[in-house]
Amino acid sequence: MTTIKMGRRALLATAVATLSFGAPAFADGHQVVDSIHFIIPGGAGGGWDGTARGTGEALTAAGLVGNASYENMSGGGGGVAIGYMIENADSNHGSLMVNSTPIVIRSLTGVFPHNFRDLTLVSGTIGDYAAMVVPADSDVSSMEDFLAAFDADPAGTPIGGGSVPGGMDHLVAAMVMEASGRDALSVNYIPYDAGGTAMAALLSGEIKALSTGFSEAVDLANQGEVKIIGVTSDARVDAAPDAMTMTEQGIDTTFVNWRGFFAAPGLPEDKLAMYQDAIAKMYDTPEWEAVRARNGWVNIHNSGDDFRTFLEGQEKVIGDLMRKLGFL
């Protein structure tokens, strides 16, 4: 069984330099942390940026955090921000860095020398499942249909994605095919430099299916451009209740591209508890629901040791698959 998943619920957390931790954890709806400085490993407008700013917006609007600030720190596939958190640990106890699945993939491939174990794990907060889609007018309507076409002509049934070979879209496609009983090495994966380019290739017939994020798949399906033939969630998702999961179709695999928060190494336990408390309480606020719904996020909440267990499981599954595909 191939499983990469987190427990349900969601949230977020915080932080950076110059902030006061004097505020104790009060009852729900009261301030838990005075301020948070978010370190964002990528540029403005990306997924990490939106997650940090959306979380900060919800935490402050709900009154759980007094104020939030943000710092974009691009470079090295996220490695610059990770290095900054580690090298300036003593002065970064007021900061929280956002990250996601690439911290696992890029540490495995040596893009940067650190991994999640070098940081303090605060909380996994949201996620985006993966999906396989085909053109709306395709005669393929399920994974069973797609697998039949693949079995008849593997090379002539390419799957595209908006990431490089060995990137997330490729790994998801390989994982799904492996779980269906096919050889991941037999997948004809065609990489594109962006989701829009990959979508154009799908609609032109250059590829037979597209491996993409679930939220993007829902948008495309709502526009009448694609059909979702499989989702890597453990249960059907409200945003597309007619879309079947891979598990329902006999393909025993789940996957979520999580996003969550990390603090500097050596963060005192009382400060860690404040961050985790603020994030846990955030999920029950209307302010968070407004941000979550606006962004199409899925609530996924793993805190502390549960977060570590999840990451270690993801690292093993992804690492094993990448070794088989020849990327490690």
Image (tube, rainbow, N blue to C red):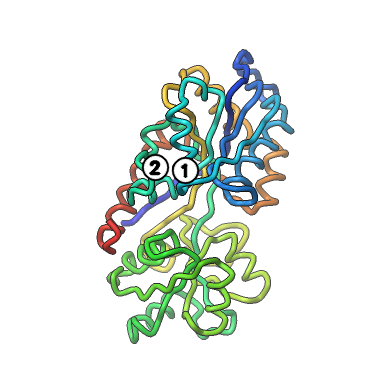
Q: Residues within 10 Å of mark 1 (few under 14, many from 20)?
A: some
Against 291, residue 236 (above or below) is below
Q: Residues within 10 Å of mark 2 (few under 14, many from 20)?
A: some
Residue at position x 67%, y 27% in the image: 64
Q: Position of residue 215 (x, y in %)?
A: 59, 59
**Which residue matches tag 1?**
7
**Which residue matches tag 2?**
310
CA distance separating discs 2 and 1: 9 Å
Tell me the mark number nearer the camera, choosing from 2 and 1: 2
Against 259, residue 15 (above or below) is above
The quadrant holding residue 143 is bottom left
Q: Amino acid at mark 1?
A: Gly
The quadrant holding residue 299 is top right
In contact (CB < 8 Å): disc 2 and disc 1:
yes
Q: Position of residue 235 (x, y in %)?
A: 50, 56
Q: Is residue 90 left or right of residue 40?
A: left
Task: Tell me the quarter of the image containing the C terminus.
Answer: bottom left
Q: Position of residue 118 (x, y in %)?
A: 37, 32
Q: Nearer the viewer, residue 277 or 122?
A: 122
Q: Amino acid at mark 2?
A: Phe
The mark found on residue 41 in the picture is none
Q: Secondary structure at mark 1?
A: loop
Task: Tell me the quarter of the image containing the N terminus.
Answer: bottom left
Q: Nearer the viewer, residue 73 or 220?
A: 73
Pick out the residue farthest to the top.
22
Against 111, residue 55 (above or below) is above
Against 246, residue 255 (above or below) is above
Residue at position x 58%, y 24% in the image: 17
Is any part of residue 9 visible from this angle?
Answer: no
